């Protein structure tokens, strides 16, 4: 499967047109269930491992409070400065110690520069870092394959949470985007997955087919957890942990 760069939709978030996507009032029941299960899986994978959480597409620090609860350092990166300002405000409200968190206005396509610039990341062995790309962030990145390969090159474990391409997921996504007031929604399907676009703000978001992740990482050891929360799919590369163990952690 060829993984060419996708249309660059950064302007959707840089101009503030993506804010409604993060408003819980716009989330259909299926999307809420997906997000709840996303956190359950991430907790099962990481709560007893890792020293630092790298959140790619962090918005206002989605997993900042989670990191504090489980005594992890936290680095959040995003391209939108207004979200990062809100993240700093959230950290202050949580009374997070300044040496436990960091927000960076950087693009995930430049992971090596992020690792060089981050004061917290430089202090931690890559084996003790896990990156999370939550809530279909991967479907909004210009060259997602480059990000996945970059994480592997830096020897960092990762968990990617995205929408699946099932009929149920596609229906939930259409309702979700319509709730966010994206007019003229158009859906298209390709070998890569299912894409929604809108005439508003250049919006475009893809839910990748599961084969994309294995193809992008060039690593057959990556695991796919299908359809969690009814509409989601998870891809993870975690040392010493397999799919059966994660399923058992969720059951217990």
Image (cartoon, rainbow, N blue to C red):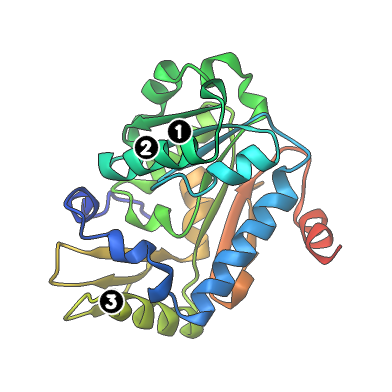
Disc 1 target residue: 150
**Residue 251 shown left or right of residue 66 in the figure:** right
- The image shows residue 165 at horizontal and vertical percentages of 46, 74
Disc 2 target residue: 108
For disc 3, the neighbor class at 10 Å (few under 14, some 14 to 19, many from 20) is: few
> What whole-number distance in Å separates the C-alpha atoms at marks 2 and 3?
26 Å
Q: Nearer the viewer, mark 2 or mark 1?
A: 2
Q: Earlier in the sequence, mark 2 or mark 1?
A: 2
Disc 3 target residue: 188
Say what secondary structure mark 2 lies in. Answer: helix
> What whole-number distance in Å separates the C-alpha atoms at marks 2 and 1?
9 Å
Determine the residue positioned at 30% across, 66% down: 20
For disc 1, the neighbor class at 10 Å (few under 14, some 14 to 19, many from 20) is: some
Front in this rendered view, residue 119 or 203: 119
> What whole-number distance in Å separates the C-alpha atoms at marks 1 and 3?
28 Å
| Above-or-below relation of 100 to 137 | above
Determine the residue positioned at 40% across, 25% down: 114
For disc 2, the neighbor class at 10 Å (few under 14, some 14 to 19, many from 20) is: many
- The image shows residue 26 at horizontal and vertical percentages of 38, 75
Q: Earlier in the sequence, mark 2 or mark 3?
A: 2
Res 197 seen here: yes
């Amino acid at each position: 499967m060829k993984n060419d760069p996708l249309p660059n939709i950064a302007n959707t978030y840089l101009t503030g047109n993506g804010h409604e996507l993060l408003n819980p009032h716009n989330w259909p029941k299926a999307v809420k269930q997906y997000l709840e299960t996303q956190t359950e899986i991430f907790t099962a994978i990481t709560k007893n491992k890792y020293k630092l959480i790298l959140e790619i597409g962090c918005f206002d620090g989605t997993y900042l409070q989670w990191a504090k609860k489980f005594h992890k350092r936290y680095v959040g990166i995003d391209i939108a400065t207004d979200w990062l300002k809100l993240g700093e405000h959230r950290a202050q409200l949580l009374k997070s110690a300044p040496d436990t968190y960091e927000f960076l206005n950087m693009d995930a396509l430049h992971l090596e520069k992020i690792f060089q610039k981050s004061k917290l990341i430089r202090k931690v062995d890559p084996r003790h870092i896990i990156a999370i790309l939550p809530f279909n962030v991967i479907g909004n990145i210009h060259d997602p394959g480059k990000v996945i390969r970059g994480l592997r090159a830096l020897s960092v474990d990762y968990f990617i949470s995205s929408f699946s391409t099932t009929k149920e997921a596609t229906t939930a996504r259409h309702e979700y985007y319509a709730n966010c007031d994206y007019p003229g929604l158009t859906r298209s399907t390709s070998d890569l997955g299912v894409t929604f676009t809108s005439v508003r703000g250049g919006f475009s978001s893809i839910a990748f087919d599961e084969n994309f992740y294995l193809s992008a990482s060039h690593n057959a050891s990556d695991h796919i957890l299908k359809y969690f929360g009814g509409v989601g799919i998870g891809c993870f590369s975690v040392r010493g942990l397999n799919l059966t163990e994660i399923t058992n952690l969720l059951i217990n």
